[in-house]
Amino acid sequence: MADILKDKQLVRQFHTALEKAQGNDLQAVFNEFMANEYSFKGVHPFNELECANDVIAQVWQPLFSSFSALQRREDIFIAGQSEADGGQWVMSMGHFMGLFDKDWLGIAPTHKLATLRYAEFNCVKDGKIIQTGFFVDIIGLMMQVGLNPLPLSTGQYFTYPGPRTHDGIRLGKSSDEQSEKTMALVNQMIDNLTALNKSGVDTCPPEVLGKTWDENMVWYGPAGIGATYTIKRYQQQHMYPFREGLTGKVFNGHICRFAEDEFACFFGWPNLTNTAIGGFLGLPGANTPADMRVVDVYHREGDKLVENWVIIDIPYWLKQQGLDILKRTQSIANPGA
């Protein structure tokens, strides 16, 4: 427990130093908090980076340069030992907020306030961060500035709230009993979905989800899919379109999966492999197997899961099928970038 608290404190200090620097002398920040052997896994176009200098140059420096007075608006902050790799991980989820003043990833600025949804995982060893998983919802930012690279979504995208209970930031000690209960429930839910995949059945009655989900569950999906509310509406607006529009579903496992108290999270690299056969995201089939990198963050109340925040690296998934939505959007909406 003492190590977990120290890990939380370290990541908290890193976030504070990062925001205070606002893009200035980020090398000093990384020298203080990152291990010499440090690796980074981020959404497309960042992908895998094995050098801290590349992470600074390709991720953080452009972000701070494009968004003036950038700040982290955190909704959930938890830590624990991953049952996937045994490492000690700290997860932060929420929104970055700033004034969108310069081009970012080819997206033209609005000079207005903008938010960028994120989930960040940091693995800590011997008092240093050794690995980062960094997910942001780029399509969500596009939609804020009036660009929608995808057809109409089945759910509703907006600036998502944190937990209904407003208690997602866990800085102190946690309950092993509650953490184990949450992790067991999430694992049961994963096992149920795996069994459904193996069965070949793309639809199921609400009662199947009701084994692990509250009837009034909220699913906060990525931009392009959107959020949905209640089991029945979740099935109608995401589960069925996802399952019926994709085939050859393979679960590849997770890099990080842990729980703290009533919250849990995971990400994979990739979590899933599947093939689009038409309909998902309103797009035609590609008949090309593609990997999905996914983040899930869960909130449990009692014996059921009540909230789920999800980020899918949709730009990466589509690029594998021949559609680069970042490049295409820039060429049409911001060709001079």
Image (tube, helix red, strand yellow):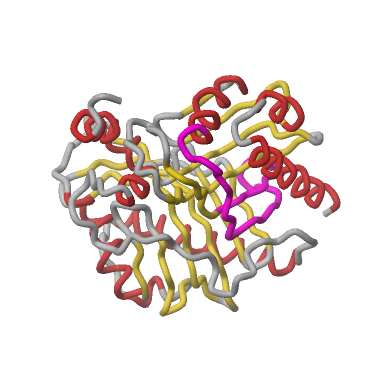
Left or right: where does residue 171 sit relative to residue 22? right
- Say above or below: 247 vs 169: above
Residue 47 point in image, percent of width and height: 45, 29
- Magenta-drawn stretch contains 333: no
Residue 156 point in image, percent of width and height: 30, 64
- Say above or below: 336 vs 139: above
Left or right: where does residue 268 sit relative to residue 245? right
Left or right: where does residue 129 sit relative to residue 152? right
Looking at the image, the residue that sits furthest to the right is 2
Q: Nearer the viewer, residue 305 or 195?
A: 305
Looking at the image, the residue that sits furthest to the front is 111
- Say above or below: 175 vs 271: below
Q: Quadrant of the C terminus?
A: top left
Residue at 30% across / 42% down in the picture?
Answer: 274
- Say above or below: 101 vs 157: above
Residue 308 point in image, percent of width and height: 47, 63
Q: Quadrant of residue 270?
A: top left
Q: Which secondary structure dominates the residues rendered in magenta? A: strand
Q: Which residues are magenta?
A: 65-93
Residue at 58% across / 60% down in the picture?
Answer: 75
**How many marks on residues?**
0
Residue at 58% across / 48% down in the picture?
Answer: 71
Q: Quadrant of residue 262?
A: bottom right
Q: Nearer the viewer, residue 194 or 136?
A: 136
Q: Quadrant of the N terminus?
A: bottom right
